[in-house]
Image (cartoon, rainbow, N blue to C red):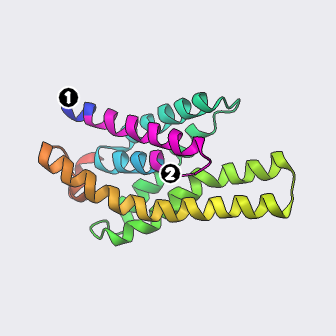
């Protein structure tokens, strides 16, 4: 039960920080990173539910008519499961690759939407591209560092660890 509160607080803080940075026009994929962490550490169904709910909250806060953030955060879950099953997850440095993918998933649609809504111009193209590259770089840095911090916190609290998710993989199926 306490781990549910931990997951809720993790997602709440990540949604709040993403909305905070997003209100200044800075695309930081904090919720995508949190959904990835929850999907690998706890299970894919919890990550999927978290991604859909957090995406709906973010889209509601921004007043978007189309709730596409839920789909984008839900798309992080198959990436997390693929990476857990087929790639070495014990190396924290290797997590920069899915972190960059999370940044691309979470901000690529926003960059494409700004190109469509504002009309194509080189200025909008370069601004969207720069935002996309920044989000990918931020994701590449955030995922490994957040795994280290959150696993240290979870170990102190006695919760499940990201680092031991691959060990319990046969039990999940």
Viewed as shown, does residue 162 lie left or right of 62?
left
Q: Does any portion of residue 89 appear in the rendered image? A: yes
Residue 1 is tagged as: 1
Count how many numbered circles sit on residues in the image: 2
Viewed as shown, does residue 22 lie left or right of 118?
left
For mark 2, give the secondary structure. loop
Q: Which residue is mark 2?
A: 29
* Residue 131 spot, x, y in % from top left: 64, 59
Answer with the quarter of the image where residue 127 lies. Answer: bottom right
Image height of 148 relative to 57, above or below: below
Image height of 88 relative to 166, above or below: below
* Residue 104 spot, x, y in % from top left: 58, 59
Question: Residue drawn at (52%, 61%), measured in percent from left and top?
Answer: 101
Image height of 145 relative to 23, above or below: below
Q: Which residues are magenta?
A: 6-31
Residue 72 is tagged as: none
Viewed as shown, does residue 66 lie left or right of 20?
right
For mark 1, give the secondary structure. loop
Q: Does any portion of residue 168 appear in the rendered image? A: no
Is 2 one of the magenta-colored residues? no
* Residue 90 spot, x, y in % from top left: 26, 67
């Amino acid at each position: 039960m306490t781990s549910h509160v931990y997951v809720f607080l993790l997602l709440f803080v990540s949604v709040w920080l993403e909305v905070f940075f997003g209100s200044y026009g800075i695309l930081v994929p904090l919720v995508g990173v949190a959904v990835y962490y929850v999907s690998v550490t706890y299970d894919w169904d919890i990550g999927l539910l978290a991604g859909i709910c957090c995406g709906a909250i973010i889209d509601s806060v921004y007043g978007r008519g189309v709730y596409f953030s839920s789909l984008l955060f839900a798309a992080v879950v198959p990436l997390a499961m693929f990476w857990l099953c087929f790639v070495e997850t014990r190396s924290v440095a290797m997590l920069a690759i899915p972190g960059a993918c999370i940044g691309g998933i979470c901000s690529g649609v926003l960059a494409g939407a700004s190109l469509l809504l504002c009309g194509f111009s080189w200025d909008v193209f370069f601004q969207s591209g720069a935002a996309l590259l920044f989000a990918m770089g931020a994701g590449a840095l955030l995922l490994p560092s957040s795994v280290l911090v959150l696993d240290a916190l979870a170990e102190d609290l006695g919760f499940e660890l990201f680092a031991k998710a691959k060990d319990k993989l046969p039990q999940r199926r």
